[in-house]
Image (tube, grey):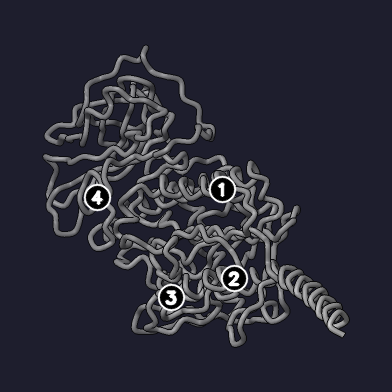
Amino acid sequence: MRQSSRRAAAALAVVFLVLSAAASEARAAESPRTPVVVVMFDELPITSLLARDGRIDRVRYPNFARLAGDSTWYVNATTISDSTERAIPSVLDGRTPLRYAPPTVRAHPVNLFTLLKRRGYALKVEEEATDLCPYPECRRRFGRHYFLAHDRLARFREWVDSIGPSEQPTLYYKHLLLPHIPWSFLPTGQRYVHTVLGPVRGLSSSEVSVFDPTLVWQAWQRHLLQAGAADHLVGEVIDRLEKTGLYRRAMVVVMADHGVSFRLGATDRRTIYPANARDIAPIPLFVKDPAQRRGRTSHGLVRTYDVLPTIAARIGLRLPRGLNGRVASSAPVRRRGRITVLSRSAIQQITMTRGRLLALKQQALRRQIALFGSGRRTIYDFGPNRGLRGEPVRRLRVTSGGPVHARLNDPSDYLDVRPEASFLPLFLTGEITGGQRRSRRDIAVAINGVVRGVTRSVRLRGKPAEYFSVLVDPRSLVEGRNEVEVFTVSRSGGRYELGRIYGKPYEPAAVANFKEEPVYPRRSDG
């Protein structure tokens, strides 16, 4: 009797072990294992990335175009809010944000980070403006101003280096305050200003610079260049994923929280109003599904709160009920006919129909193309008297500037230029003296005897001084010593006339060759 009891007990133990193993295998099969990569840029409207034909500009932004070739580009994606503190939580928890809910895990306890952590994911998470990740390995250590002023590109590259094969499924999430101000970076990742404040205090400030049209358009130009730096980083992410063998099987999401607007007299570039909704609401959103190999476009009105449900559907993650978001490719998203964007202003929100949104996007693109073109026309080809760019000074009529003189900021930067260095002195600024009160004048800047930049002098509200500022193409500089000249520009008898206000005549024999063709220098640590 005792022996048969032992046999029965042993049989029950075997059955229990088999059932336990089966249950474990079932749970393992239900658990998502797909690597997830999310890159969140800041202040990047989709218009900034577009060419004249409405597609991604392959010349200026080759890596966004590369990503679009492998992923689904949600062409009509829009933010839910003009505020980072509300837009990003809606991405992470799939809900319409409450007006006064802080961007913390206490206000958003069920989010992408907590959901995946509970399902066994490792977290390589870096937040720069929110606090939704409660775990020790991903808590934010500094405030936003620190992240704006310190090593933005270096921190991103450290995060990229953390991507690699692992037996444990991993979420790689990075919010980067780029192309967010301050504008400091070229598409190569090199800097062109020494400090975040820039060479002239207030030159980039939305409080005092937005009343001068030259500075408004130049701010836009600098934003587009920094969007090129964002593109460069997208390329580094793709390269890393391919090198580690994760690219094909990973879920990859690249997007922005909201856009930014450049309008004369608008002291707030971020708060959405009817007049700037075309720049704030539309955002880039690229989603590469696991094993996706061909690019697609989708024209549904996808919102930021649709990102979490879309990730969950692709990797097999079960979500709680009651979310506002839907899977981006679903019928409810395709049927949407209007959107609402929450505003930080007193109007609280803006609602647009699908037709109105599409019309506004077309307006935004036409406005950008009119100023900066696209494709093989470089972003540096900008300003009044563009026909002077590339002209040797010796072929032009040059006179004395008379009582008008200019002072160049940081002239020592041009004594020993290294094209591969982390800093390139491409942002030429200075003060003009001797002119009439409140006067403005057309300016040309020559480097090594060739006109490389054209602009109009500017005045900052509340300051009596007259300034000039212009960005020149990196290929304007040669290795070693470079000579800078500054001129006023006028027309006489249908011909340009230059008035020298800074620098000495340059010897023409030393002029370097210069070709107006886009180039993509090697990576710099910036």
Nearer the observer, disc 3 or disc 4?
Answer: 3
Rounded to the nearest angstrom, the CA distance separating label 1 from label 3 is 27 Å
Which residue is under mark 3?
105
Look at label 1 and name its amino acid.
Answer: Val
Look at label 2 and name its amino acid.
Answer: Val
Q: Which numbered tag is attached to residue 307? A: 2
Q: Are marks 1 and 3 in contact (CB under 8 Å)?
A: no
Dividing the picture into quadrants, the one containing residue 273 is bottom left
Residue drawn 50% across and 55% down?
Answer: 48
Q: Are marks 1 and 4 in contact (CB under 8 Å)?
A: no
Answer with mark 2 or mark 4, whichever residue precedes in sequence.
4
Which residue is under mark 1?
237
Answer with mark 1 or mark 2, whichever residue precedes in sequence.
1
Nearer the observer, disc 2 or disc 4?
Answer: 2
Position of residue 456 relative to residue 1, above or below, is above
Which residue is under mark 4?
197
Mark 1 nearby-residue class (10 Å; few <14, some 14–19, many ≥20) = many
Rounded to the nearest angstrom, the CA distance separating label 2 from label 4 is 35 Å
Rounded to the nearest angstrom, the CA distance separating label 3 from label 2 is 18 Å
